[in-house]
Image (tube, grey):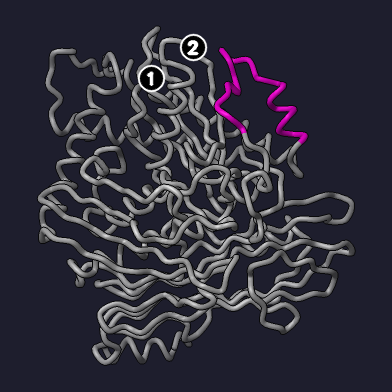
Amino acid sequence: MSQQISPSTTLDPITVEVLWTRLISAIDEAALTLHRASFSTVVRESHDYSCMVLAPDGQSVAQATRSIPSFIGTLPMSVRAFLQKFPAETLKPGDVIISNDPWIGTGHLPDLTLAAPIFLGETLVGFAGAIAHMADIGGRRRAPDNKDIYEEGLQIPILKLYEQGQANETLFEIIRQNVRVPDEVCGDIHAMVGACSRMTEGVSGLLAEYGLPDLMGFGDKIIGLTETAMRRAISDIPDGVYEATTHIDSFDTTAPLVMQCRIDVRGDELSVDFAGSSPQNRSPLNSVLGYTSAYSSYALKCVLSPDIPNNEGAFHPITITAPEGSFLNPSYPAAVEARATVGHYCTSAVFNALAKALPDRTPAESGVPLHGFAMSGWNGETPFSTIIFFNGGLGGRPSGDGVSALSFPTNVSNTPTEVLERAAPVRILDKSFLPGSGGAGQFRGGLGQRVAMEIVSDRPVTLSVLSQRLKHPPIGRNGGANGSLERILVNGREVEGGVPFHLTKGDVIVLELPGGGGFGPPEARDKSLIEQDHADQMA
């Protein structure tokens, strides 16, 4: 039944909450559409996608419950760039804009960003946005030795994928010609378009049901309440400067990459500056500023105000900067395929600095980054290209043990064994927790995992491993022990992860992923928890 609201009526808190919940529900339905209609394992099984509704000016209003959290920071930037190319007054119903430009989007080419205008009558009331990680985008598959973006795949500038409901078939043909698995890639793109359509219907239907002339009548209220809550949380931090240095394994040199993080708190505002960090490098270990900012802001939100809504208001009081030409703000045409490997460390860097101010609220380092492995070649007579995700353990928390084999700071699921064996010519020999890999502490780190797989293809297979934590383990917090290091073994021989592996039938790859650091001194751990660890073979 329609519940008309007079335009002059001030929205009360209960009505705002109802509208907010209804909006998220509509976005969740769109995300489910994307999930169910997708073709690739990276979207369907690993859930590497996001759906969002944005304001007419590109501000984020609401995000799907099951989404990659950092995309709340990147999609608004993309939509604002789209509006510079296609001003709002030129857009029509049925338009869909696309790009994978890393510098205005999620930071690397495999992620496609789509946005569709939402109209109520002839009035533009917002945008439906979707991001998804493609199974392939051409180029050298996640190769650790890529030197620039031209090696990394197809670059799609800001273009219209659909114009007033008509597909840009020329663009689809270009995409199909440049990827190894065109049916999967184009199938996922169509699933994204379907999700945008579902959000468009949901938002316009909600506004019509309540008689609201536009989205921001209650969207501004939601964003404002979120900003107020975040400012209140920042105000609880003592004013001052808090610094920490985090080290990252590099691909192109034996010296580590240095991430220098400086947090400056002044009243209800906070800035994060990465001045002093390593320069950009001739490897894909570079994170564009938008991605650096997204994960730095997300880390702050996790500690300061994890329960407030995910929208633009949470980030208004926060400023993120990094020197241009650094590996946290690289200049084009830097290689950026491994931007997650770098960007996920931003959470560690922010946690390490923030712990100087809030030691009892900041968790230990997790077994980040997300461990993604690209595999391609031939599966029988069919070419294949797939992304495999496996996760390390989370760091011990102030309130409990770290969770084992769970993705953080992203929200990507481990690739299921059965799905992987169908998608690629491999046989999984072992997939189990690694006992003792979590750092000891009052609250121990979550366990990493061991994955062993055998190549069963009669033709060569290429495996690209963007490895990390081979030299720098997840550090413990407040007296907790460090988590374990990552190890990669090929046919029993330990190897580095800085080059692609060319494998043949019978080769066995073993991945041992790191556990999280411990929180608090081990001697403070409850005796019953120690006994349970041994009973569960966690220790």
Q: Is residue 66 visible?
A: no
Quick check: 218 above or below 386? above
| Residue type at the position of mark 1 | Gly
Check disc 1 and report its element: helix, strand or loop: helix
Q: Residues within 10 Å of mark 1 (few under 14, many from 20)?
A: some
Q: Position of residue 290 (x, y in %)?
A: 41, 44
Which residue is drawn at the image coordinates 31% and 50% (left, top)?
297
Which residue is drawn at the image coordinates 29% and 77% (left, top)?
477
Question: Camera-side residue: 327 or 34?
Answer: 327
Instruction: Tell me the distance, in whole angstroms, between the alpha carbons under discs 2 and 1.
Output: 18 Å
- Residue that mark 2 sits on: 92
User: What is the number of the mark on residue 205?
Assistant: 1
Q: Quadrant of the N terminus?
A: top left
| Residue type at the position of mark 2 | Lys
**Residue 169 drawn in magenta:** yes
Question: Camera-side residue: 412 or 169?
Answer: 169
Q: Quadrant of the C terminus?
A: bottom left
Q: Seen in the image, is 137 located left or right of residue 47?
A: right
Residue 260, image quadrant: bottom left
Which residue is drawn at the image coordinates 64% and 75% (left, top)?
496
Span colored in magenta: 156-177
Question: Camera-side residue: 62 or 211?
Answer: 62
**Residue 420 drawn in magenta:** no
Tag 2 near tag 1, CB within 8 Å: no
Q: Position of residue 287 (x, y in %)?
A: 48, 52
Q: Position of residue 425 (x, y in %)?
A: 79, 62
Which residue is drawn at the image coordinates 26% and 67% (left, top)?
362
